[in-house]
Image: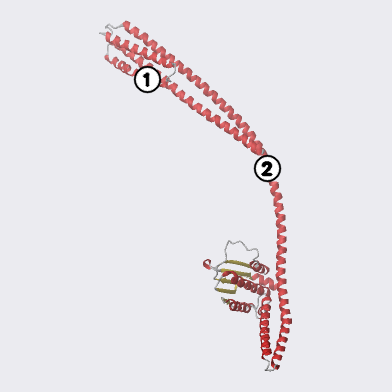
Amino acid sequence: MVVLGIILVSIALLAMNATLLVLNTRAAMGSNEQYARSYEIKRTLSGFQSIVTTAESGQRGYLLTGQIAYLEPFFRATRSWRTELDHLRSLIAPNSPRQRSVAELEKLTADAVRRLEQTISSSDQPGPAGKADVAGTEHATATMDRVRAVIDELMREEDARIEALRAEVLRDMWVTVGVALLTTVVVVLVLLGLHRLLRRYVAARAAAENALLQANEHLNRLVEERTAELTELSQHLIRASEEEKANIARELHDTLGSNLTAINMDLNWIARRLPKDVPEVRERLQRSLQMLSETVELKHEVIEGLRPSHLDNLGLAFAIRSHCQEFSRRTGLDCDVDVEEDFDDIDPAWSIAFYRIAQEALTNILKHAQATSVKVELRRENGGMRLRITDDGIGIQQNAPPKTKSHGLVGMRERMRQVGGVLSVTRGPNGRGTVVDAFIPAEEQKLSAAV
């Protein structure tokens, strides 16, 4: 609030200084116009005085010498004095008292010129030996003196006006300089105060930022710790889930499998000893054997879903081929498998991770992709091992918000993170379909082997 008040005061002072500068500039421009007008009036008066003096000199020269050449400047002056006088009248304001002096000057000049012309016309024989109109000349000279007196008075008035304008301009200049100096001093003081406030503000802001930085660092450490704990927990849950699935699959295989086998043997023993004259019993027995066969098949599918025996016994390549064949049989979708080798030497953790990702990806394709064909590729690369699953469905939306209850992609990424790999899900070529790409660097294989 204090800073805002200081800024407003500075702006007000600068605005006042600018206003005074504009007003004084306008006044100076007005004074300059008046200066120019006064000097033009003086120039016109000087020119007018020169014209009447020329007329008088031409008249005297003609009377004294009798030479016609002196009459040429005389007639030129008598023709131009009114033009100069009209210009003088236009320079003076219409309602100015000096217009009366101009009118008097016009009257006197007209009278003087008329008398000069009369002396010229009344002097029959001008020259040194001639006879001139001396009385008329003296009367014209007296009139000319009155003309010059009026001109001198007007000149003095313009000089007085010029001096008054000079004093006014000088006063305005000193006022402007004083106000500018005062404003400058006040603004400098205000800026110094503002500088001190800004230094305090910067120091306080730096302290707040430092405290916020420390809080952020502490929060980041907590987030990293919690993230590491959650990652470790997630990986532990994945491992525990796989172990639990393997235990359940083993229990189902060992316990339920042996029981179903015993039931199957007993039912077959009964079927062989049933008499042929009890068709209803034999029919029910055959139906029970069929249901038992279906139960055995269901048990096999459940066990394979929990822990695929092909993966442990025949390797990753065979397990993926087998799963894709079963997927095609159940869904009718064309599943093309491109696996170049058996991959018997890879870490078991890699095998189960790649298998589960392929399993989850095919499930998602069936649920969401609306695809007609799927391609599964598994191969070694110079930098590691890659599993790529491509479909020709509607494709994943690039900027779609994640679904809150969709854990499939999260689980696949977490499986890759557990074995040191990365997983990406992008749109297919030309924007059609989806590509699930899982890659584990070769260094992770070495680390797993070392462990």
Foreground: 355 or 265?
265
At 66% across and 88% down in the image, what residue appears?
A: 283
Give the vertical position of 401 relative to 376 (above or below): above
Q: Quadrant of the C terminus?
A: bottom right
Instruction: Tell me the CA gap for discs 1 and 2.
Output: 72 Å
> Percent position (x, y) of residue 137?
33, 8
Give the vertical position of 301 relative to 188 (above or below): below
Q: Amino acid at mark 2?
A: Tyr
At 46% across and 23% down in the image, what residue appears?
A: 34
Colour mapping: secondary structure
At 29% across and 15% down in the image, what residue appears?
A: 71
Task: Answer yes or no: is residue 386 visible.
Answer: no
Q: Residues within 10 Å of mark 2 (few under 14, many from 20)?
A: few
Q: Is residue 259 left or right of residue 172?
A: right
Which label was assigned to residue 313?
none
> Percent position (x, y) of residue 124?
25, 8
Q: Amino acid at mark 1?
A: Asp
> Percent position (x, y) of residue 219?
71, 55
Give the vertical position of 449 relative to 268 (above or below): above
Q: Does dot 2 land on a helix, a strand or a loop? A: helix
Q: Is residue 303 left or right of residue 17?
A: right
Foreground: 187 or 13?
13
Which residue is denoted by mark 2 in the rendering? Answer: 201
Foreground: 59 or 171?
171
Which badge, 1 or 2, comes first in the chain's sequence? 1
Task: Answer yes or no: is residue 47 visible.
Answer: yes
Which residue is denoted by mark 1 in the rendering? Answer: 86
Q: Quadrant of residue 436?
A: bottom right
Q: Does dot 1 land on a helix, a strand or a loop? A: helix
